[in-house]
Amino acid sequence: MIAQAYLEEGLLHAWAPPHETLELFTWNMLRLVAAPHDATLIRQYLAESRSELPPGALSPSGALVLQGLTGSDPTLVNRLIAALPPEIHAEFTRLSPRTEIRQLITSVFLLHDPNDPFMPRVEAIRLAEALLQSGNPAHYAQFALFEYVRPRPNVGSETLWDGVRLSFFLAPMLRSLK
């Protein structure tokens, strides 16, 4: 799978995304394949775990997607991205929060669990930094009280302080709702 790692302060960190994330990523990559028959061939290949497809079976774009979905070399990612067709680059740009972030004119409160399996911590930090650069500094904090968006069960005394911090963090947001 493409990367399954993220870069933070120049270091590559392994990341094992949840099954739902892998499925969504695969679906989106197949949706963006240039030739419709590529998606069918790639789905069959992934389902059957074949050793290889016949040469020339995929379009150039389809071959890139298959490499991205099956490769394990993190250095391959930038080469694959650079080789994608312009319309796919445009789609990624359109989907990125950075595209419209300058138009956001409200306070943004970012709460993140540093162990969130759906999004590496560094991505929440990058979003907060992008908001700051756009002139709209985010209220950002990390809390170990949650598993993704649900409160963590069996919260121990080590996270009690996080509960107090969360109360102070949410107070300005609640005041702004009046």
Image: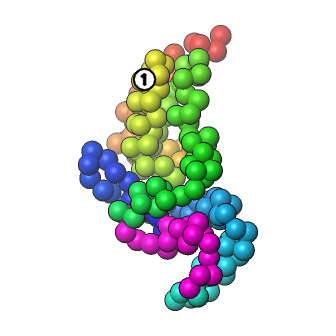
Label 1 element class: helix
Q: Is residue 163 at least partly visible in the picture?
A: no
The figure's colour scheme reads rainbow
Q: Residue furthest right?
A: 36
Q: How many marks?
A: 1
Residue nearest the observer in this picture, 37 or 172: 37
Residue 113 lies, with reference to residue 14, above or below; the image says above
> Which residue corresponds to the image point at 58% horizontal and 88% vertical from the top-left?
54
Whether 68 is among the magenta residues is yes
Instruction: Using the rendered view, name the quadrant where residue 103 is placed.
Output: top right
> Which residue corresponds to the image point at 59% horizontal and 22% vertical from the top-left?
104
Q: Is residue 67 at least partly visible in the picture?
A: yes
Identified by mark 1, the residue type is Leu
Residue nearest the observer in this picture, 32 or 155: 32
> Which residue corresponds to the image point at 42% horizontal and 23% vertical from the top-left?
132
Across and down, in percent, residue 142 comes to: 41, 36
Q: Residue furthest top?
A: 178
Residue 146 lies, with reference to residue 35, above or below; the image says above
Give the residues in magenta.
55-74
Residue nearest the observer in this picture, 54 or 26: 54
Across and down, in percent, residue 129 comes to: 40, 30
The residue beneath circle 1 is 132
Across and down, in percent, residue 107 comes to: 55, 19
Whether 60 is among the magenta residues is yes
